[in-house]
Image: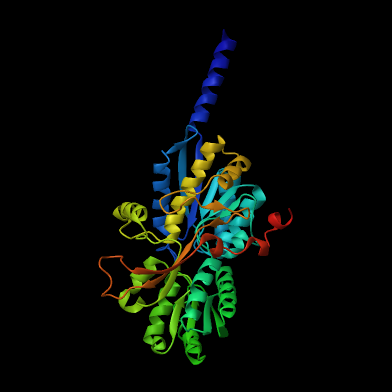
């Protein structure tokens, strides 16, 4: 009798433990620094909406979302993710704005066989040199923005370029890729300067750009650094004789600048809230809680989390190998992604749109900031797989 009671207690305890298990998703973003507006709390909201739309559970287990602020520091990001992986046994790491932080996190997830979906960092190296069999690059990268913006501006007469690039892996990749596009289109680069991330005064760098004689000043700078650069360029009168080309800018940046300052600027993004009825419907739902329209990064977080949960359900397990196979196998489909393919290097193939910022007179409602100029198809927007330096792809 005692033996039967002990067995029953053991079964009950095991069942209770299983019921208490959760699928753990770690969202790491900048919640307090220069990328807080384009990621931050909006990314957390987008992840919660994805979990809600997936039903809140998967395989009978509650989906748990944990957020963390990496402060744009690779060492902070690494410390947090190490605990997530080795102590708390997280199933997915996602987000990770700031390219240096995302590459540091990628090394840890790759070494430990944990799935990551980098939907916020923009360095093309995430699906290239820093690729991973369990890693994915979801929303955007420096290559797609460089190709969309660089080619178009040269065709519009902006043949001589000077770069201001943030001193990060993203800044280097963005300048490198845009330089290649500019030169391929018949333009040339007359100079460049690296800018420390978070530097409030960019006057000396802008004066170098002004004195270069370049027709176009390419800004490979993101977040509040980008906003500061545009404002200071306007104050110095740089935009009277030179054009600014935003190599990475989001709708919240344009909102902060205002149409008077940003009008006429070319901006490339794969997502815009007003693209179609589906994007408008979801974005207004997002706006009701966040009081700002979603950025490409925030929309990408939703897409990443939603697809991950779909893959877990299809795999019938959270085992990384099985889920990774389903992530690659299933087409990515959500409110802004139409049956996108996940390439073998982890890159999601999606189109990118070139927009021109409207004038105040052209804007008909709040957040009505962009007019569509052109669209680069998904296959053309991604770095060719034939040129990859992804180790696990080239070794096959």
Q: Residue at x 57, y 84 (%)?
A: 188
Q: What colour scheme governs how the chains and residues are painted in the rendered image of this protein?
A: rainbow
Query: Residue 176 is drawn in which quadrant?
Result: bottom right
Q: Position of residue 358 (x, y in %)?
A: 33, 73
Please tell me which residue lies in front, 139 or 338.
338
Which residue is the extreme one toward the right?
A: 395
Q: Position of residue 8 (x, y in %)?
A: 54, 16
Query: Residue 361 is drawn in which quadrant?
Result: bottom left
Relative side of 284 to 248, left or right: left
Residue 386 in view here? yes
Q: How many marks?
A: 0
Q: Residue at x 46, y 62 (%)?
A: 270
Q: Residue at x 36, y 59 (%)?
A: 273
Q: Position of residue 392 (x, y in %)?
A: 70, 54
Please tell me which residue lies in front, 153 or 58.
153
Query: Residue 371 is drawn in which quadrant?
Result: bottom left
Residue 31 in view here? no
């Amino acid at each position: 009798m005692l033996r039967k009671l002990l067995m029953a207690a053991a079964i009950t305890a095991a069942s209770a433990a299983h019921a208490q298990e959760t699928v753990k998703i770690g969202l790491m973003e900048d919640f307090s620094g220069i990328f807080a507006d384009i990621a931050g709390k909006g990314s957390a909201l987008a992840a919660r909406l994805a979990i809600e739309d997936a039903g809140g559970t998967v395989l009978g287990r509650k989906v748990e979302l944990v957020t963390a602020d990496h402060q744009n520091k690779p060492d902070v990001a690494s410390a947090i993710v190490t605990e997530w992986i080795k102590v708390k046994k997280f199933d997915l790491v996602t987000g990770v704005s700031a390219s240096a932080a995302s590459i540091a996190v990628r090394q840890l997830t790759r070494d430990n066989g944990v799935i990551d979906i980098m939907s916020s960092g923009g360095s093309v190296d995430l699906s290239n040199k820093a690729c991973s069999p369990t890693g994915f690059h979801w929303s955007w990268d420096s290559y797609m923005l460089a190709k969309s913006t660089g080619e178009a501006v040269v065709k519009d007469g902006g043949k001589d370029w000077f770069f201001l690039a943030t001193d990060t892996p993203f800044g280097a990749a963005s300048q490198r890729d845009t330089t290649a596009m500019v030169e391929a289109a018949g333009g040339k680069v007359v100079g460049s300067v690296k800018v420390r991330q978070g530097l409030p005064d960019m006057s000396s760098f802008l004066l170098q750009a002004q004195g270069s004689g370049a027709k176009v000043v390419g800004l490979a700078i993101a977040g509040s650094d980008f906003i500061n650069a545009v404002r200071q360029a306007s104050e110095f009168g740089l935009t009277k004789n030179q054009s600014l080309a935003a190599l990475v800018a989001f709708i919240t940046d344009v909102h902060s600048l205002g149409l008077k300052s940003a009008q006429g600027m070319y901006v490339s993004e794969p997502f815009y809230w007003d693209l179609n009825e589906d994007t408008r419907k979801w974005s207004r739902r997002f706006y009701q809680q966040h009081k700002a329209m979603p950025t490409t990064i925030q929309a990408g977080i939703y897409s990443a989390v939603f697809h991950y949960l779909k893959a877990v359900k299809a795999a019938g397990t959270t085992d990384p190998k099985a889920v990774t196979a389903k992530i690659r196998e299933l087409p990515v489909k959500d409110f802004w992604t139409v049956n996108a393919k996940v390439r073998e290097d982890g890159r999601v193939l999606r189109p990118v749109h070139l927009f021109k910022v409207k004038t105040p007179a052209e804007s008909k409602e709040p957040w009505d900031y962009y007019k569509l100029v052109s669209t680069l198809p998904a296959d053309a927007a991604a770095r060719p797989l034939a040129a990859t330096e992804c180790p696990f792809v080239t070794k096959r």
